[in-house]
Amino acid sequence: MQPVADADYFSFLGLSRRLKIDNAELEKTFYSLSRRLHPDYFMNASEQERQSSIDRSSLLNDAYRALRNPVKRAQYLLSLEGYKEAEKKAPSELLEEVFELNMQIEEMRMAKKMGDTDEMAEARAELEDALASLDKKLNEIDSRLFALFDQWDESLDNGAGAEERKTVLDRMSELLSHRSYIRNLVRDIREEVSDVR
Amino acid sequence: MSYSDKVLEHYNNPRNVGSLDKKAPNVGTGLVGAPECGDVMKLQIQVNPETNVIEDARFKTFGCGSAIASSSLATEWLKGRSVDEALEIKNTEIVKELNLPPVKIHCSVLAEDAIKAAVRDYQQKQSETEQTEEAAVNA
Ligand code: FES
């Protein structure tokens, strides 16, 4: 096994950096490695070996958590390839939309506070509409994201040049940043409309 | 995590919350966001076109306390500065003034970006009006 410090999650689990992962396979790998790193096996080992097995099992857990979820996996790949999420600028229409919906959430909160039931019903209806369209958007983003997963894997398989791979990663990074705005918004709206007080 | 007194002060008592007429030729609007947390910040400046001095500044931020405090502070600093001086405001100054911890640095970056975006918007509007004025003169 390689030293813990410079192992990335993919190589630690013996995987290439492909994005399409069979979750059942991944789970199997995870369990078999977990078993091998179980503290019981290291009862009579040296202090150093014991420590290293502990380090490896915590790395294993992190790796599994990061790679099991497709969005997290893509985020992790981007970070490995030197991307920072925050660097991506969102298009202004998206920001406008996020801003407007936050205004509506605020109106809803205000109406709740004032106990204005008419306002509340109106605000709630608007937010619920918004929620439906955001959910749709999220689905669209996800299917585009998965199409990019395929493109990425292909680019690995046919040894595409750095240029081509970068195009795929750029698009992925952009989509993930949009996704994250929408996810946060969906979370906030949901919280607001589900809370019936 | 606890906020510094200065952050709390701006948070509880934000300065210059609100909006200016987005369509006015002497108003610049910057709308920026941080994807990690989904926070958005709108910052507007109203400029005297004769002197290039910022006469008024407003903000509306949906985000964490540090982002609110950073934008509130930014509007205070902007008033009375020239547009060029506005561009010199650095997020590190905001971090220092508000005592922001490392995990909250991106919130101050948001404020710096918003200032830049607002100034850019204003300058673009100015050059457009100049062009139409020139066209009118040449017509
Ligand atoms: S945590 Fe999002 S701007 Fe501060």
Image (spheres, coloured by chain):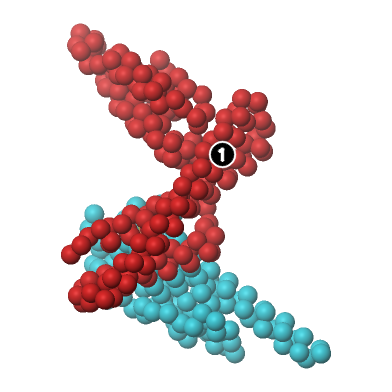
Residue at 46 percent across and 47 percent down: it is A139
Picture quadrant where residue A103 is located: bottom left
Q: Quadrant of the N terminus of chain A?
A: top left
Residue at 47 percent across and 38 percent down: it is A74
**Label 1 belongs to which residue?**
A148
Q: Position of residue B96 (x, y in %)?
A: 36, 63
Q: Residue furthest top?
A: A44
Task: Look at chain A in the picture and name its colour.
Answer: red
Q: Using the image, name the chain to which the residue with label 1 belongs.
A: A
Task: Look at chain B in the picture and name its colour.
Answer: cyan
Q: Position of residue A156 (x, y in %)?
A: 60, 28
- The residue carrying pointer 1 sits among few (fewer than 14), some (14 to 19) or many (20 or more) residues within 10 Å by Cα, namely some
Q: Position of residue B23 (x, y in %)?
A: 55, 81
Q: Is residue A161 above or below residue A103?
A: above
User: In the drawing, does residue A135 fall left or right of residue A31?
Assistant: right
Residue at 36 percent across and 19 percent down: it is A28
